[in-house]
Image: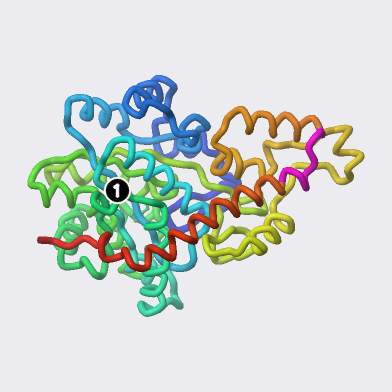
Amino acid sequence: MKKEFNVTPWEVSGDVDYDKLVREFGLEKISDRLLERMQKHTKELHFMLRRNVFFAGRDLKWLLDEYEKGNKFFLYTGCGPSGPLHLGHLSVWVFTKWLQDKFGTELWFQFTDDEKFLLNKNKSFEEIKKWTYENMLDVIAIGFNPKKTNFLVDTKHAGLMYKEACKVAKKITFSMVKSSFGLNESSNIGLIFYTSVQAVPAFLSSIIHKKKIPCLIPHAVDQDPHFRLTRDILPKLGYYKPASIQSIFLPPLTGNQGKMSSSKSNVAVLTTDSPKEVENKIKKYAFSGGQKTTKEHREKGGNPDVDVSFQYLKMFFEPDDKKLERIYEDYKSGKMLTGELKEILIEKINNFLKEHQRRREKAKKQIDKFLYKST
Ligand code: TRP
């Protein structure tokens, strides 16, 4: 039978069935019981947790057990710098910042310039260096605590990371990476090695502090194959398996398939888009669950469950459950038209981006505070 969707770290296509992915990857869905436990520590629950945007993970129970015993974890996430960033990237980091604030944790943030160089036939290191810089501005603009956040750039911190990556690589065979990464005999050998580099920040802090420290990785579900392997290997090197908390993808504007992508400008809202560009993109491309004519819409109502504007409000831009519920009902009943729903979203995105872009400018002077320096 043909697979109707595909999710690997380097390709997301088709209509992703998340329940099927949970079974295939062997993930644990986040239960209400677990959310209650988290809430004991965080007081409130982030709406991305309440609404199952972060829907699955690994070893979260264990992580909380350790935390409650006083064995605090650190956070690890990352960014592949190959182009401009879009809202889909930001949503994972907005949530990561919330975790950092609530648990007061250290965060290791990896910029995988090597990965993007190896992956993209036509990208030079010069170009990727530019994107690394640009993407750092966006990450800083999220508001991470500079005292508790360490940026790692794979090629820049190679001296620190390479030996550790080799220790991981020595325990991975080609056949272990082949299918879950979509690699084959004609893949370049850099990519075959690469997963061992992405494993390193999951235990680097343990090396530096000379003790085993639990690690929590917030990420979109496509990165799971990396950390599945990392989890197999770290205990063999004397470290804990990293725990993870995983999100679904913010859909592309066009609604149908896969995840937002910066390389197709009509399917993603970029972090640097102007208010006018945001307005045009949403009006022109955001897939609508509305009816063809106003008359028909008033009679039959719209379908918020397939409407991309509604999904963006739910997943990112309307934290207030009551307001979201009202929009849902009004759209479904036909009281609210597609144009009106889009206006709500446009305003929300533009407010968010206005502040984001202001902080992004300020970030130009802050990069040095975030880069990890070994002492
Ligand atoms: N490979 C990721 C990407 O292409 C970047 C990344 C590195 C990452 N380490 C990570 C993402 C840890 C999430 C968590 O975007």
Quadrant into which the N terminus falls = top right
Residue 235 shows in the view: yes
Q: The magenta stretch spans which residues?
A: 334-341
Task: State which image quarter holds ligand 1.
Answer: bottom left
Q: Would you say 170 lies left or right of 107 here?
A: left
**Residue type at the position of mark 1:** Tyr
Can you tell which quarter of the image residue 64 is in? top left
Where residue 58 appears, as percent x and y from the top left, is 34, 35
Residue at 61% across / 27% down in the picture? 322
Q: Is mark 1 within 8 Å of ligand 1?
A: yes
**Percent from the top left, x then y, of residue 74?**
24, 42
Coloring scheme used = rainbow
Name the image quarter holding the C terminus. Answer: bottom left
Q: Is residue 187 visible in the rendered structure shown here?
A: no
Q: Is residue 1 above or below residue 26?
A: below
The one nearer the camera, 236 or 114, is 114
Q: Secondary structure at mark 1?
A: strand
At horizontal 17% and vertical 62% (from top left) the residue drawn is 373
Q: Residues within 10 Å of mark 1 (few under 14, many from 20)?
A: many
Q: Residue 155 location in percent, x, y?
A: 26, 70
The percent coordinates of residue 27 (x first, y second) are: 40, 35
* In the image: residue 7, left or right of residue 104: right
Q: Identify the residue shown where x is 35% and y is 77%.
A: 125
Kindly identify which residue carries mark 1: 76
Specify the quadrant of the image occupied by residue 303. Answer: top right
Q: Is residue 210 above or below residue 366?
A: above
